[in-house]
Amino acid sequence: MASRDKHDRMANAIRFLSMDAVEKANSGHPGLPMGCADIATVLFTRYLKFDPKNPHWPDRDRFVLSAGHGSMLLYSCLYLTGYEDMTIDQIERFRQLGSKTAGHPEYGFAAGIETTTGPLGQGLANSVGMALAERVMNAQFGDDLVDHHTYVICGDGCLMEGISQEAIALAGHLKLNKLIVFWDNNNISIDGAVSLSDSTDQVARVKASGWNAFHIDGHDPEAIAAAIETAHKSDRPTLIAAKTTIGFGAPTKAGTKAAHGSPLGAEEIAGARKALNWDSPPFVIPDEVLSAWRDAGSRGAAPRADWDKRVAASGDGRAEFERRVAGKLPADFDDAIAAYKQKLAVDKPKVATRKSSEMALEVINGALAETIGGSADLTPSNNTKTSQTKELSAGNYGNRYVHYGIREHAMAAAINGIALHGGLIPYGGTFFCFTDYARPALRLSSLMGIRSLFVMTHDSIGLGEDGPTHQPVEHLAAMRAIPNHLVFRPADATETAECWQAAIHSQKAPSTLVLTRQDLRAVRTEYVAENLSAKGAYELASADGADAKVTIFASGSEIEIALDARDLLQKDGTPTRVVSVPCFELFEEQDKAYREKVLGNAPVKIAVEAALRFGWDRFVGSDGAFVGMTGFGASAPAKELYKYFGITADAVAKIAAERVRNGVPKGEDARAIPASEPARPHP
């Protein structure tokens, strides 16, 4: 085959695998794979550094299909280049239950899928984190071990999403020049022409954010290659605006919205076979075409072998590099936390848990060279910076603190990208109420099961005077509703250290630490070697002298209230115990005997939290009492708000005493806050 004919045949292999898989599944998106096949062919056969036989090679280039609806583009390339777990059977089972070829790429389903994409813009923002991680690891370990690119294909929809501007601006500011983004500029969205809803000059916009950006013909392989060569020489990230035709090759649907998200139909596919001179039956790739693709897949074996030799010759740094890319912690990490907990038992600090977090991070960042912190422009409030984390900037990638700017969504997605890249443990902070802005990325970190760490301060009505806009009374419920997400709400400095330790040990679930603005007294006043918070809930104070008649469950700042209520009840002759619940999710992982022991048999059970009731019935039952919030907060000093909303030790003790005397009420009355329920105050 001549060079151009060979390229066309290889690109058409992507097109026909994609349209045939969508047709068999009777759902999917053939348009993007058909339109971007030329881009993917040039990239995978001539530039992308990868080795299908060693798919987790740390120095591979990363390829991110941000426009995840076009997943058959990725699956086709993985099959054609020889990834062992992407078989033709998997292609034929596209979008079927139990297959590796989900409707959108799912991280962990198959090697070569670098991140979960589908919610538009997430992959683009992930790629910023990946590119940043590459620069940081390169600064720490050098070109011999870390020197690769991050490539992205995004669509019109990715660029319309707000997260894209956050991510693009951050990447431009940090001059992440090894980030190369292809924009599938086909001018079609689901509704029709992009001009129905948008007239942005995307190239000008991206240039204004500090990128190199230019237009090319997305169906000209030499123009695509020249664009990649230009991007490789850039000192800035690059956007290649590739003009393509959606559904390229379809005789009547190419260039229209009909090619976007529906099967083409047998007649249209037959017409495409004729137009593109492809006479193979569905899912059959001609031998010479498949052989050419497999040859392209084998390109990476030699550079990967050379890299292995460089790693072997890297001397003292080899063990540290291999430990970090494997995600393992140093042997003395837990010892450092134990020593710190012993110090806390002596000092008994009375500080806000956001300050406790900073104190714990001072120890953690000293023990772990791989942590990389940051904040969405709230560093002095989140307390996320320590003495070890100097400011990272363009050209100073060896430092460990990222100023993400007021970009909560992109920060969370970039943290996911850093975690996915490997070698680093990322964390970033903002106010807890701004999980509203970051939640799509928080959810995806949970879906992927990665070690992303989120620091969320100013956690409740304890924020006080800033008022309801910044008092996240419903956000604990929302975060706890996300499967596979560890939500920690520690009560003091010791619990905060333990929660950090548990979060860092969690490699299959992300974590959010929910922290106070107001000072909290030490409630763990004696050193215990075991990480009690890692059990999710534990008995903090037992009942004196007899079996408990009351158990009070609480988290975070309300542990103080629970302990004070216990004192009042004990003085009145009512045996009362207090259970601290720093993490619902970890408690559910404990064995049945432990859970039953912690829940106990007290006839009266009360939960206390300056938030909504959601989730607490697990501890107190549907008839148990809950002292917390039913609506929004108000603007006033924190102590006044706690009193105003009836979240006090006196209220808890009163409710408990009434229930001990009169029994537990049944029905709807048990579900209401059994304390004062004032209407929301207005000016």
Image: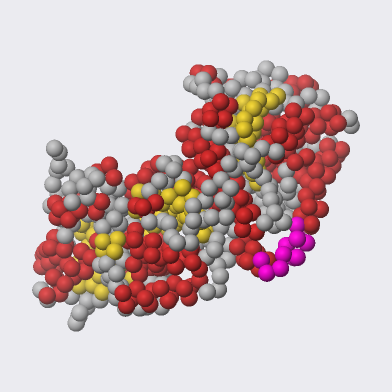
From the top left corner, tell me how far across and down residue 356 is, in percent.
Answer: 35, 63
User: Does the image show residue 108?
Assistant: no
Image quadrant in which you'd find residue 632: top left
Residue name at image x 67 percent, y 45 percent? 149
| Residue at the outermost right position | 1
566 or 137: nearer the viewer: 137
Relative to 422, 575 lies left or right: left
From the top left corner, tell me how far across and down residue 510 is, in percent.
Answer: 47, 56
In the image, residue 399 lies in the stretch drawn in magenta: no
Determine the main secondary structure of the stretch shown in magenta: helix
From the top left corner, tell me how far across and down residue 672 is, in percent.
Answer: 19, 52
In the image, residue 308 lies in the stretch drawn in magenta: yes
525 or 267: nearer the viewer: 525
From the top left corner, tell me how far across and down residue 329 is, in percent.
Answer: 55, 67
Residue name at image x 54 percent, y 55 percent? 399
Compared to residue 572, the image places residue 300 above or below, namely above
Relative to 433, 154 lies left or right: right
| Residue at the outermost front position | 395
Relative to 165, 240 lies left or right: right
Image quadrant in which you'd find residue 305: bottom right
Here the colouring is: secondary structure
Residue name at image x 34 percent, y 67 percent? 493
The image quadrant where one finds the C terminus is: top left
What stretch of residues is rendered in magenta? 307-317
User: Does the image show residue 391?
Assistant: yes
Compared to residue 424, the image places residue 90 above or below, namely above
Image quadrant in which you'd find residue 487: bottom left
The image quadrant where one finds the N terminus is: top right
Residue name at image x 73 percent, y 62 percent? 311
